[in-house]
Amino acid sequence: MPDSISTTSRISLTVNGHQHELELDNRTTLLDALREHLDLTGAKKGCDHGQCGACTVLLDGRRANACLVLAVAAQSHAVTTIEGVAAGDGLHPLQQAFIERDGFQCGYCTPGQICSAVAMLAEVDAGWPSAVTPDIGAGTAQLDEAEIRERMSGNLCRCGAYANIVAAIAEVAQTPPEEQ
């Protein structure tokens, strides 16, 4: 390989509101940058093919499988991990609901489930359609079990805690924002 071709890049990532300067191999995924270079181990490496959702983080508030995003491509985006979803010292309402509703067993998928649920609730508020309710206006989707399951279908749980995960999300979805 010629010396003029660089296999690394100096990048700047904004993660959970903090700027990080990193020198990374150009092939480094966002997931590996978070886990191996920034010690943010909440996002998990499950399948490493974007099929399980264990690595779900938020890019500018939208769900993303961190195992499929190159770190160099995430530079111009605000990255939020499970470590950054809560404001201040308290838990995010979804984190609290997962605890109260026992929405996890082993906990491996929980960070991705919660990040996905945060974005999913924002999608519903914005009026994004789903396969269950394809024609909705902003904030009019009824988040029943079928709707939640469809919208969360990209996140798998090997333990089978789906009933409690759905209950936790439904609880937060039905709570007015001022009470959360």
Image (spheres, helix red, strand yellow):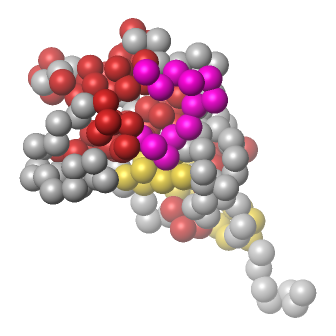
> In the image shown, does 61 or 135 lie closer to the viewer?
135
Task: Indicate the position of residue 69 as horizontal and vertical percent values.
Answer: 58, 61
Location of residue 165 in the rendering, given as x and y in whole percent from the top left corner: 43, 24
The foreground one among 83 and 53 is: 53
Quarter of the image for residue 25 reads bottom right
Q: Is residue 161 magenta?
A: yes
Residue lying furthest top = 100
* Residue at the spot 70% in from the left edge and 47% down from the top edge: 47
In the image, which residues are magenta?
Answer: 152-163
Q: Residue at x 15, y 27 (%)?
A: 177
Q: Quadrant of the C terminus?
A: top left
Lateral position of residue 77 relative to residue 104, left or right: left
Q: Is residue 121 left or right of residue 56?
A: left
Q: Is residue 72 visible?
A: yes
Q: For residue 160: magenta?
A: yes
Q: Quadrant of the N terminus?
A: bottom right
Q: Main secondary structure of the magenta part?
A: loop
Residue under the point 35% across and 50% down: 61
The location of residue 131, given as percent across then percent down, is 31, 53
